[in-house]
Amino acid sequence: MASDKKEKLSGIKGMNDVLPQDAALWELFENTAQSVVQSYGFQQIRTPIVENTALFARAIGAVTDIVEKEMYSFTDSMNGDALTLRPEGTAGVVRSVIEHNLAYEGPKRLWYKGPMFRHERPQRGRYRQFHQFGCEAIGFTGPDIDAEIILMCRRLWDDLGLDNIRLEINSIGDASERAAHRAELIKYFEAHAEQLDEDAKRRLHSNPLRILDTKNPAMQELVNGAPKLLDFLGAESLAHFQGVQDILNRSNVQFTINPRLVRGLDYYNRTVFEWITEELGAQGTVCAGGRYDPLIESFGGKPTPGVGFAMGIERLIELMKVAGEPALPSQCDVYMVHQGSEAQTQAFILAERIRDAGLDVVLHCATPGGAGSFKSQMKKADASGAAFAVILGEDEIKNGTAVVKPLRDREAQQVAVAFDDVVEHVVDDIVGNDHDHDHVHYHH
Ligand code: HAM
């Protein structure tokens, strides 16, 4: 290397590292979410991060923020294919379901998680690489499944100990109902053309429904007076929407109907919903979804209804931090402290035996500072969150024993235990004290 100055490497704006401390929180969230959706019979599906650009343009809609300006699209330099980093998960799941004829076997309850990419302006809760945990229920027609996935979300908030998330729902009807509403909407906005901002003018004839979603304060009054889609719904759509509300009411799920909830993706019909918190500032939607009955047929599949949602994992992690410091799993159950080469050999043997018994063990290893004094090793043992330090020094080697020192229970005494009894001693205590891990607890 020619240059003396070593340039510092940095990551890409809006794309974040998740460091070990936070990663433990992510794992807690993901494991809790996974166990909740599995308790409703959802099965995991994994699809690629890269898909053909055309898939997203067709699924999400050409005149949407995502497709117009937020996609990471590129040309495959090997063969000229137009590719895109997935901005969301539904399109890829639906593509996979059609490609593998999954829906022909019967209805499917699917879940997924992973990174999504949108070239948005980064701010708190809004990133260019972000992560979703999502579910898609494919092949179910009734309001029952819509209500079920909402109940599933509520169970997750309960298990995570999050009680500050509220639910908004709406029905956006079917295509012909939206067409009738759209005609009236365009008439209304045309009659007030002087009050439209640039975005609204551009969308007036391409996607007027999205004007209702405007964040521009100057347009709020105009939008409030606009014809409401709910007033254009026919009997079937209304009955479906009522069916969802009935189940939610009987299940004690609180919600408000927001007639202006229209969602930013074009594939939706009928039920749409968002879970929103006030604790995170402007980006307070932690979960959003709805029904997309026409999507599979529009991709050339057999007509098959669908409904689903996706959660923003970053936002939920933030919310968990707001709720307090969750009790996280420790790095290990046992930390092995040793001094001298005989003791090190014995520590390796004991550590493997304890792992054979199913526990997590961190064995102290040398660092650039050296092997570490007894005291500095004990500090590391404390910081690891282990329940026990198992300590081996010259005396222990002579006696054929190890010292087992409880680290969390300050009352408990350390004891010298024969090599052969260490595993049993440690396992009995840890397994005997295993607590209920069903719910996430917070320290305040
Ligand atoms: P979405 O509303 O675009 O829907 O995204 C769902 C959630 O992902 C949002 O509510 C938010 O929590 C999170 N999210 C979106 N963009 C960002 C970002 N730039 N940074 C951080 N978090 C973000 C969908 O993606 C649909 N596929 C949901 C769905 C599934 N509908 C039916 N099935």
Image (cartoon, rainbow, N blue to C red):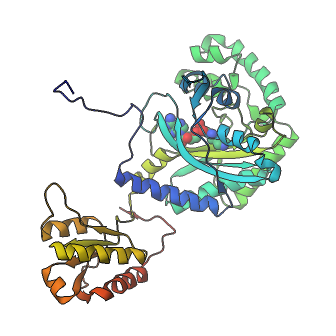
Residue toward you, 405 or 209: 405
Relative to 349, is 247 above or below?
A: above
Residue 11 image point, x, y percent: 36, 34
Residue toward you, 215 or 111: 111
Residue toward you, 119 or 176: 119
Q: Image quadrant of residue 93?
A: top right
Residue 262 image point, x, y percent: 67, 34
Q: Which residue is the extreme one toward the right? A: 235
- Residue sitting at x 26%, y 88%: 417
Relative to 173, is 334 above or below?
A: below
Left or right placement of residue 92 versus residue 324 in this view: right
Quadrant hosting ligand 1: top right
Quadrant of the image containing the N terminus = top left
Query: What is the count of numbered marks?
Result: 0
Residue 114 image point, x, y percent: 53, 45
Task: Report if residue 323 is visible in the image.
Answer: no
Relative to 204, is 307 above or below?
A: below
Q: Image quadrant of residue 82?
A: top right
Residue 230 image point, x, y percent: 76, 36
Task: Report if residue 416 is visible in the image.
Answer: yes
Residue toward you, 221 or 333: 333
- Residue sitting at x 30%, y 67%: 362
Left or right placement of residue 378 versus residue 430 in this view: left
Quadrant of the image containing the C terminus = bottom left
- Residue sitting at x 22%, y 83%: 403
